[in-house]
Amino acid sequence: MIRSEQLKKLSWEHHDALKFARNVANGLNHNADLNQVRSYAVNIAENFLEPHFKLEENSLISRLTETQLRNEAVVEVLKQHREFNLLKNRLQQAEAADLRPLLDQFRELLKIHVNLEERHFFPFIEQTLSEEQLLQAEREIDVGHIVDCSNWPDPFWKPRY
């Protein structure tokens, strides 16, 4: 999918988000310690997703008019941003027996969210914002772009032999 230069760094972050979702899935498939997978997911939510969502909301969504804010993709993006926050809180408080389904939900929501933004939200933004607005957004994205959030002391997603 061709992405405008102004939004490319956010798309790169989406690539990282899919890698994080795959790591959670692999951890679950390899029967990793669920508390460790939970710690990883909460860390990703706090240090990657929340700043990413804030950047999208402040640099892109804040530039939309009241009418544009009612676009289906925009409404769903904001809804999913809130869902991630609730899911992170549920993960933090969950008992061991509830972790697997919550981690599965985290992984799945992450994949769905990236798909929504890449296929519907970003094209809407690219068509809706003016060139000047996109250039202003790009400058803000350049400052807030998360280069790497993948360091984890024990890669639980790799098979143990």
Image (spheres, rainbow, N blue to C red):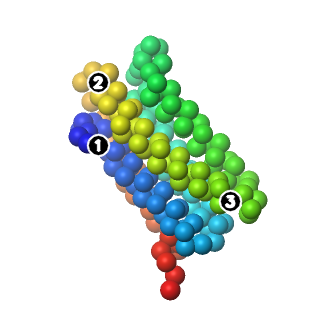
Q: Residue 84 at x, y = what percent?
A: 58, 43
Q: Few, some or many C-alpha atoms within 10 Å of disc 1 (few <14, some 14-19, many ≥20)?
A: some
Which residue position is annotated with label 3?
99
Q: Few, some or many C-alpha atoms within 10 Å of disc 3 (few <14, some 14-19, many ≥20)?
A: some
SS category of the residue bearing label 1: helix
| Nearer to the camera, 113 or 50 | 113
Of tags 1 and 3, which is closer to the observer? 3
Q: Residue at x 32, y 31 (%)?
A: 123
Q: Which residue reaches farthest top?
A: 67
Q: Residue at x 50, y 70 (%)?
A: 157
Gap in angstroms between the C-alphas marked 1 and 3 = 34 Å
Which residue position is annotated with label 2?
127
Q: Is residue 155 above or below residue 75?
A: below
Q: Residue 100 at x, y = what percent?
A: 65, 60
Q: Which numbered disc, 1 or 3, marks the residue that appears first in the sequence?
A: 1
| Nearer to the camera, 11 or 46 | 11
Instruction: Name the kind of residue labelled 2 in the image.
Output: Gln
Which residue position is annotated with label 1?
8
Instruction: Name the kind of residue labelled 3 in the image.
Output: Leu
Are discs 1 and 2 less than 8 Å apart at CB? Answer: no
Q: Few, some or many C-alpha atoms within 10 Å of disc 2 (few <14, some 14-19, many ≥20)?
A: few
Q: Residue at x 50, y 26 (%)?
A: 75
- Mark yes or no: residue 123 visible: yes
| Nearer to the camera, 147 or 33 | 33
Question: Residue 32's image quarter?
Answer: bottom right
